[in-house]
Image: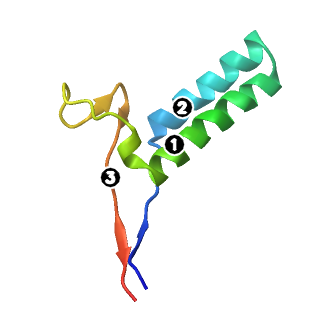
Amino acid sequence: MPDRVVAEYRLSPAALTDLDGIWDYAARTWSVGQAEAYVRGLAADLDLLVQHPRMARERRETRPPECGKWRFRRLETLNVG
């Protein structure tokens, strides 16, 4: 049986606050449905990056790779059985 890579992401408290702000802004500006769609879309994009980490471009101009309050770390767990 081949090794299986288990990957996940965790959002910092600051990132969760940012997501709440995105939801609030979208709900006030457009609708609750649009706010839900934005947050679901962001979660789907993060899930996609977890499953296919090489599809994103590494930002070499920052060390460690950062964007605002977000810090990206790669965690891989190999299950050998």
Q: Could you classify mark 2 by the number of other residues whose Cα lies within 10 Å: few (under 14), some (14-19), or many (20 or more)?
A: few
Q: Position of 48 compared to 41: left or right?
A: left
Regarding mark 1 in the picture, which secondary structure is present there? helix
Query: Is there a contact, CB below 8 Å, between mark 1 and mark 3?
Result: no
For label 1, the residue is 46
Observer-nearest of 64 and 58: 58
Q: Give the amino acid at mark 1.
A: Leu
Residue 17 appears anywhere in the view: yes
Image position, residue 8 (x, y; %):
46, 57
Q: From what the image shows, is residue 76 above or below residue 54?
A: below
Q: Position of 22 compared to 78: left or right?
A: right
**Marks 1 and 3, how far apart at CA:** 13 Å
Residue 9 appears anywhere in the view: no
Image position, residue 13 (x, y; %):
47, 40
User: Looking at the image, how many numbered discs can be counted on the residues?
Assistant: 3
**Marks 3 and 2, how far apart at CA:** 22 Å
Q: Residue at x 74, y 10 (%)?
A: 29
**Marks 1 and 2, how far apart at CA:** 16 Å
Residue lying at the far top of the rendered structure: 29
Observer-nearest of 78 and 39: 78
